[in-house]
Image (spheres, rainbow, N blue to C red):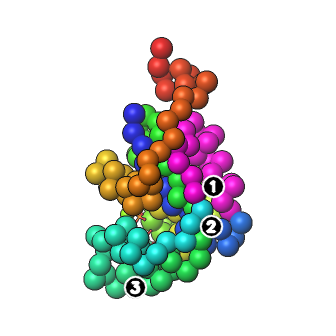
Amino acid sequence: METTLILFKPDALHRGLAGRILSRFEEKGLQIVGLKLLTMSQEMAAQHYAEHVGKPFYDGLVGFMTSSPIIALALRGPGAIHVARSLMGKTFGNEAEPGTIRGDFGNSRSYNLIHGSDSAESATRELGIFFPEGLQEWTPITAPWLWDAE
Ligand code: IDP
Ligand code: MG
């Protein structure tokens, strides 16, 4: 079982796509264990995007991500990190496959709607930034069928 950190970026909220994007994950069977609306501080953005410091797009990315509210989401399920990334599609909307969130809802290289953790280490680190208080522990009544559990 894995837990991943998803962010709906400001463009997802401005474009009124938050509900539709959330539905993709719910329909897939990922469990919501954390959900909040917040505006990212400069400090949070710097921590979250530390690996990108110095890249040409870094200042624009941080400016965009701190410009208005985002939704932070913690999702759980078997292989949740990879499963969520595959639902999201490739980084740039104009390269992402149709059927993916980025492939269906965007055509931009900078405004790509969503972030998802890329590894177990990233997920642990990023969940700590957005959910320092911890996550909600609960068991969906459908868990045996969602998770291949007995
Ligand atoms: P990811 O979001 O698919 O993991 P990363 O390479 O980790 O992609 O980049 C983080 C974010 O930085 C991207 O989601 C995108 O918003 C932005 N970004 C990455 N590369 C570029 C670029 O070449 N131009 C503009 N923005 C970029
Ligand atoms: Mg990344």
- Amino acid at pointer 1: Ile
Q: In the rendered view, does 136 fall on the left or right side of 46? A: right
> Which region of the structure is painted magenta?
17-36
Residue occupied by mark 2: 12
In the rendered view, would you say 111 is above or below 126?
A: below
Q: Quadrant of the N terminus?
A: top left
Residue 59 marker = 3
| Closer to us: 38 or 16 | 38
Which residue occupies 53% across, 32% down? 138
Q: Indicate the quadrant where residue 116 lies.
A: bottom left
Pointer 3 or 2: first along the chain: 2
Which residue occupies 58% across, 46% down? 25
Q: Dot 2 surroundings within 10 Å: few (below 14), some, or many (20 or more)?
A: many
Q: Dot 3 surroundings within 10 Å: few (below 14), some, or many (20 or more)?
A: some
Indicate the secondary structure of the residue bearing disc 1.
helix
Indicate the secondary structure of the residue bearing disc 2.
helix
Which residue occupies 41% across, 55% down? 132
The verdict on label 1 being within 8 Å of ligand 1 is no
Q: CA distance from mark 1 to mark 3?
A: 26 Å
Residue occupied by mark 1: 21
| Residue 63 x %, y % | 48, 83
Asked whether the residues under the numbered discs 2 and 1 touch, taking CB atoms below 8 Å apart as contact, a structural biologist would say yes
Specify whether residue 102 is in view: no
Q: CA distance from mark 3 to mark 2?
A: 20 Å
- Amino acid at pointer 2: Ala
Pointer 2 or 1: first along the chain: 2
The verdict on label 3 being within 8 Å of ligand 1 is no
Q: CA distance from mark 2 to mark 1?
A: 8 Å
